[in-house]
Image: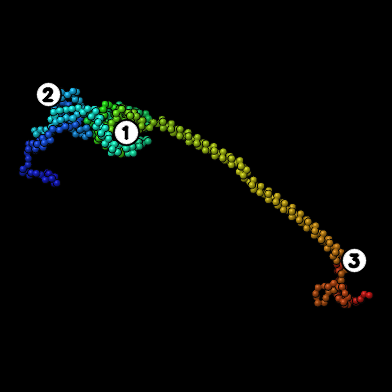
Amino acid sequence: MAPRSSTPSNSQETAWPVHRLNESIKGWIDRLGWLWVEGQLTQINTKPRWRFSYLTLRDTEVEQSIELTCPTSVLQELSSPLNDGDRVVVCGRPDFYVGRGRLSMRVSEIRHVGVGQLLARIEALRRTLAAEGLFDPARKRRLPYLPQKVGLITGRGSAAERDVLSVANARWPAVQFEIINTAVQGASTVPQVMEALKRLDHNPSVDVIIIARGGGSVEDLLPFSEEALQRAVAQARTPVVSAIGHEPDNPVLDNVTDLRAATPTDAAKKVVPDVAEERAVLEQARARMAGALRGWERREREGLNALRSRPVLADPMRPITQRREEIERARNLIRRDISYLLRGEQSQVAGLRGQVSALGPAATLARGYSVVQVLPRDGSGPEVVTSIAQSPPGSQLRIRVGDGSITAAAMSTQRSD
């Protein structure tokens, strides 16, 4: 049943037979004419007595291929024999076999792609990706300090895999690996590595990814310079490390990844920390911290001792005692001064009292004299009698003598001569 969005060019009643469809397809394909096509050879099937040889040309970046039909004489005329994995360009014409509905390409010429030409293409791709910013150090991510799980993409049973695992386990036995074995040479390398990279990048437990291979010729390393792989690495969210053991040429992968390692062994050293070195660093840090703590404690103790040696801290009551002694001395001085003043005043009072006593009436009375006072009838205070007029007969008198007083009455008065 045809999709609703498409409209067939004929009707059910006028349906084409298969031969007409195949002939139409062949006509369309024949219009392409002769083409130069580049790819990688696989499945070379040839014998000297055969008139035609059969090969498969695969794309270097994706899982696509086309069958080639080539005269055996063309292969025999080549300067060097063809091998699986050779990078070639072929001149041919697409051919559609209507009998079986099979597409192939009839080839009239095959040429090896030279190393110089391959290197020129790699450099051109390197310049293009650099202009796009894929080599910019600012976009490269830092590797985790201690990865819990490392993704490893390498060949099955390869020396690169053994080197990475042995070195990593020796440095940090607790590290875990998620290993995906892929082709590391040939036409299937790029799609398999890209698929493995996608799987590891989507695994949340993988902290870093290593792509490792143990070196090789320029032709062997060509898959690691394919554009599709570079863009896949650039789009990955997990840090990627390239570990293609080779010198001095390096594939484009080394420029795109977040870190380049010279060899798989070097990659393991850069990704996985050395537990012995880390313990040594911890011991050094612990020793430095302990020394710093001891120095701080010593300085603080010395400071406390210096404070304790001060008089105010050696005897906290001393200032109070000193003030108390000062107050006591001041009070004694004040008391002495007051006593001195009192004695002086007492002496002065005693002297004045002696003078008063000597001059007062008491002394006179003591010598036999007396003082006569009259008591007025109105009850007012007594008056000293100095005249007989003050004490008419019958007046009440009080006579003061040295040791008391005598009450008497005036019997009569007599004026003196």
Left or right: 110, with 244 as reference point: left
Q: Residue beneath label 3, please?
A: 368
Mark whose residue sits in front, 3 or 2: 2
The disc label shown at residue 154, or none: none
Q: Nearer the viewer, residue 93 or 340?
A: 93
Q: Is residue 56 above or below residue 351?
A: above
User: Which badge, 3 or 1, comes first in the chain's sequence?
Assistant: 1
Report the residue that reaches farthest toward the right.
417
Amino acid beneath label 3: Gly
Q: Is residue 258 visible?
A: yes
Q: Residue at x 17, y 32 (%)?
A: 37
Query: Tag 3's secondary structure?
Result: loop
Q: Is residue 411 above or below residue 32?
A: below
Amino acid beneath label 2: Trp
Where does residue 7 sit, x and y in percent of width and height? Answer: 11, 45
Q: Is residue 100 visible?
A: no
Callout 3 crowding tier (Cα within 10 Å): few <14, some 14–19, many ≥20:
few
User: Decide: marks 3, 2 in contact (CB < 8 A)?
Assistant: no
Q: Residue beneath label 1, please?
A: 241
Q: Residue at x 29, y 36 (%)?
A: 130
Q: Residue beneath label 2, please?
A: 50
Q: Residue at x 22, y 32 (%)?
A: 60
Amino acid beneath label 1: Val
Label 3 – label 1 distance at C-alpha: 144 Å
